[in-house]
Image: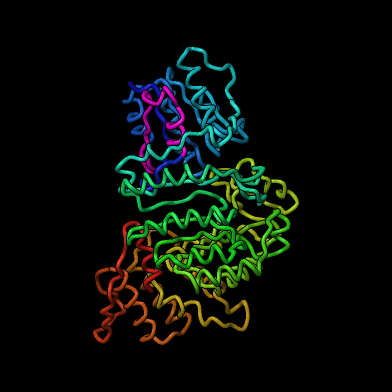
C-alpha cells in the first residue's frame, strides 16, 4: 500500500534527491506506506501525474526548487484537476518564502516552509487520521540534528551504481552573503561526526564511490574536515571521487597536508569567489580575505591534485562591467580548471532584495529570477555576459580546447584590460552570437569551425597554428570526422583521454 508519494523533478537523472530521502527516513511508522518518485526536467506533466496516480497515494509531497518550480506548478495543477481528493503538500527552498505570491502554493493543500524533517511526517499523520490542519501554511520545526534520522540507506542500488550521492556533514552557514538563503541561518550545525562517517562507510561498502557534499562550508571546522578526508584516504581507489564546497580564504596547513595526499582526480573543490571587489563584498555582507583566497587558490592549483571549480557572480549591486571583467581576469590568472559565471538571482527570502531600489536592480519576474539590469550594467550588457557565460561553458569549461584556448585568450601577461582574457573572450562571444544568433545547440564540429574562423580572420592567428591546435583538440576529445579546415598535412593523432565514470569533463582538464 502506498499512502504517501514523495516526489520532485530533478535537473538531470544523475541527481538523486537528498531531501526526499530525508523525508522518507523520518516518516517513522509511515515509512512502509511511502514511495519516492523522482522525475527529470523535460518529462511531460501529464506523464508525471499519471505515474504518481498509478501508485494510488492519499498524499503527495513535492520538493520545489528554483529549477523546477514552473514544471512542478503545471504538475500540481493537473493533478488537482484529475484527482482533487489527493492531498498535495509542497515544501523546499522555493516555497519557504513569499508563499502568498506563488501559484504552486495556491494550488497545493498545504505548504511546509523551512525544515521538513519532523514537520512533514507529523502533517502526514494528521491528514491520514482525518484531522488535517485548518491552515495552509505550516512553519517547519528545526529540531536538534540528533533527532533527525540519516537518509543514506534509502539510496537504492541503482542510485549507488549510476547517480551522484549527495551527503551532508552539517547544515547551515555562519556567513551572511546576501544572495544566499544561508544568510538567514544563525550558524552552522554539525551532525555527529562518528555517526555520519558510519553512514558513509555503509554506502562505501555497497559500492558507492561518487560522493557530493552539500555542506556550505566544508572547511569551517578543520578538525572535522581532516577527519572526513582521512576517512576517504583510508578507502582510496581509482574510482573514488569526492566533491566539497570550501571557504576560499580558510585553508590551514593541517588541511593542506591532508589534501596533498590525494591522487589526481579524487577531489573536487568548489571555491566561491563571487567577486573580488571589496566595496561590493561589503555591500552584500560577504567577508573574504582576498589575498588569502588568492594564495589558497594558487596552492590548490599548483600544489594539490584536486580539481578546482571557481565561481563568479555577475550583476551584484555596485559592480560594473569593468569591475567584473577585472575579477574574471584575476581569477583566470590563478588557473582554476573551471570558472563558472553565474548571473545574480533574487532567491525568495534572501536579503539581496534590499538593494533593489538603491542600485536600480531589475529582476526577472519568472524563475530563475535573474537580474536583468542594474544601475551599473544595462540590459544589453547583462545579455552579453549571459552569452559569454554560455560560450565559456562550451569552450573554457568543457576541457576540449586546452590548446586552442591560449590562442583565443592571448598571453598570460597583457598590457591592459582591453587586451585581457575577459575582453578577448567577450569579443569572440559577441562575434559568435552575431554569426549564429544562438547560445545552445552548437555542434562541436561547427564550434571548431567558428573558432578557426575567428582565430584566423579576426585575431589574425597564423592559419597553420590555429589549425594544428583545433585539430588536435578535436581529435583528443574523442570526436570523429574531419573538420573542414583540416588538410592532409595535419595529422593530430592525439591520444584520447582515459576517463572515469561520470567525470569526463574533469578528466579532460586533469589530463591536459
Which residue lies at the image location 40% right of the left edge and 72% below the top edge? 401
Taking depth in this image into account, of 411 and 172 the one nearest to the observer is: 172
Is 435 situated above or below 11?
A: below
- 41 inside magenta stretch: yes
Q: Nearer the viewer, residue 38 or 172?
A: 172
The residue depicted at 55 percent of the width and 39 percent of the height is 93
Residue sitting at 69 percent across and 59 percent down?
281
Residue at horizontal 59 percent and vertical 26 percent from the top: 137
* Residue 347 located left or right of residue 148: right
Q: How is the image coloured?
A: rainbow
Q: Position of residue 81 (x, y in %)?
A: 42, 23
Q: What is the x, y in percent for residue 20?
A: 44, 36
In the rendered image, is residue 380 in sight? no
Q: Which residues are magenta?
A: 19-44
Give the tally of numbered discs: 0
The N terminus - image quarter: top left
Instruction: From this view, report whether residue 23 is shown above or below residue 472.
Output: above
For this orientation, the residue located farthest to the right is 358
Nearer-the-camera pick, 191 or 78: 191
Magenta-colored stretch includes residue 346: no
Image quarter of residue 159: top left
Q: Position of residue 241 (x, y in %)?
A: 39, 57
Q: Is residue 390 depicted above or below 138 in this figure?
A: below
Judge whether residue 499 can be spotted in this image: yes
Q: In the picture, which quadrant includes the C terminus?
A: bottom left
The residue nearer to you, when weighing 222 against 484, is 222
Give the percent coordinates (x, y) of residue 233.
41, 59
Q: Quadrant of residue 367?
A: top right
Amino acid at each position: 500500500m502506498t499512502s504517501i508519494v514523495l516526489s520532485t523533478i530533478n535537473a538531470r537523472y544523475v541527481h538523486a534527491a537528498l531531501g526526499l530521502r530525508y523525508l522518507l527516513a523520518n516518516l517513522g511508522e509511515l515509512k512502509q506506506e511511502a514511495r519516492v518518485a523522482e522525475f527529470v526536467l523535460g518529462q511531460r506533466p501529464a506523464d508525471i501525474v499519471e505515474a504518481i496516480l498509478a501508485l494510488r497515494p492519499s498524499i503527495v509531497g513535492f520538493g520545489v526548487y528554483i529549477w523546477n518550480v514552473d514544471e512542478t506548478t503545471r504538475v500540481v495543477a493537473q493533478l488537482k484537476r484529475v484527482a482533487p481528493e489527493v492531498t498535495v503538500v509542497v515544501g523546499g527552498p522555493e516555497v519557504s518564502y513569499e508563499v502568498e505570491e506563488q501559484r504552486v502554493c495556491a494550488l497545493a493543500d498545504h505548504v511546509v516552509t523551512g525544515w521538513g524533517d519532523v514537520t512533514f511526517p507529523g502533517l502526514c499523520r494528521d491528514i491520514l487520521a482525518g484531522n488535517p490542519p485548518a491552515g495552509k501554511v505550516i512553519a517547519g520545526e528545526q529540531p536538534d540534528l540528533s533527532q533527525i534520522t540519516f537518509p543514506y540507506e534509502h539510496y537504492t542500488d541503482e542510485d549507488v551504481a549510476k547517480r551522484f550521492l549527495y551527503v551532508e556533514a552539517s547544515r547551515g552557514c555562519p556567513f551572511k552573503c546576501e544572495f544566499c538563503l544561508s544568510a538567514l541561518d544563525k550558524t552552522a550545525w554539525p551532525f555527529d561526526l562518528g555517526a555520519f562517517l558510519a553512514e558513509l562507510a555503509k554506502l562505501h561498502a555497497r559500492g558507492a564511490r561518487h560522493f557530493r557534499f552539500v555542506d556550505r562550508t566544508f572547511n569551517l571546522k578543520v578538525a572535522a574536515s581532516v577527519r572526513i578526508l582521512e576517512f576517504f584516504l583510508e578507502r582510496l581507489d581509482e574510482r573514488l571521487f569526492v566533491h566539497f564546497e570550501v571557504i576560499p580564504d580558510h585553508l590551514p596547513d593541517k588541511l593542506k597536508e591532508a589534501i596533498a595526499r590525494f591522487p589526481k582526480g579524487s577531489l573536487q573543490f568548489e571555491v566561491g569567489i563571487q567577486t573580488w571587489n571589496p566595496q561590493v563584498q561589503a555591500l552584500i555582507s560577504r567577508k573574504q580575505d582576498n589575498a588569502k583566497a588568492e594564495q589558497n587558490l594558487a596552492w590548490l592549483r599548483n600544489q594539490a591534485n584536486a580539481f578546482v571549480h571557481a565561481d563568479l557572480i555577475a550583476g551584484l549591486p555596485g559592480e560594473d562591467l569593468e569591475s567584473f571583467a577585472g575579477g574574471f581576469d584575476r581569477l583566470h590568472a590563478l588557473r582554476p580548471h573551471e570558472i563558472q559565471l553565474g548571473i545574480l538571482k533574487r532567491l525568495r527570502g534572501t536579503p539581496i532584495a534590499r538593494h533593489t531600489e538603491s542600485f536600480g536592480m531589475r529582476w526577472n519576474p519568472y524563475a530563475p529570477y535573474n537580474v536583468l539590469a542594474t544601475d551599473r550594467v544595462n540590459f544589453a550588457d547583462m545579455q552579453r555576459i549571459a552569452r559569454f557565460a554560455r560560450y565559456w561553458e562550451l569552450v573554457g569549461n568543457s576541457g576540449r580546447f586546452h590548446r586552442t584556448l591560449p590562442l583565443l585568450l592571448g598571453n598570460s601577461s597583457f598590457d591592459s584590460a582591453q587586451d585581457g582574457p575577459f575582453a578577448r573572450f567577450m569579443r569572440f562571444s559577441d562575434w559568435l552570437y552575431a554569426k549564429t544568433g544562438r547560445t545552445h545547440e552548437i555542434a562541436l564540429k561547427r564550434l571548431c569551425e567558428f573558432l578557426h574562423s575567428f582565430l584566423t580572420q579576426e585575431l589574425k592567428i597564423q592559419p597553420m597554428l590555429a589549425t594544428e591546435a583545433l585539430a588536435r583538440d578535436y581529435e583528443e576529445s574523442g570526436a570523429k570526422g574531419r573538420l573542414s579546415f583540416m588538410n592532409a598535412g595535419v595529422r593530430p593523432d592525439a591520444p584520447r583521454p582515459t576517463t572515469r565514470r561520470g567525470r569526463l569533463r574533469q578528466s579532460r582538464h586533469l589530463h591536459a
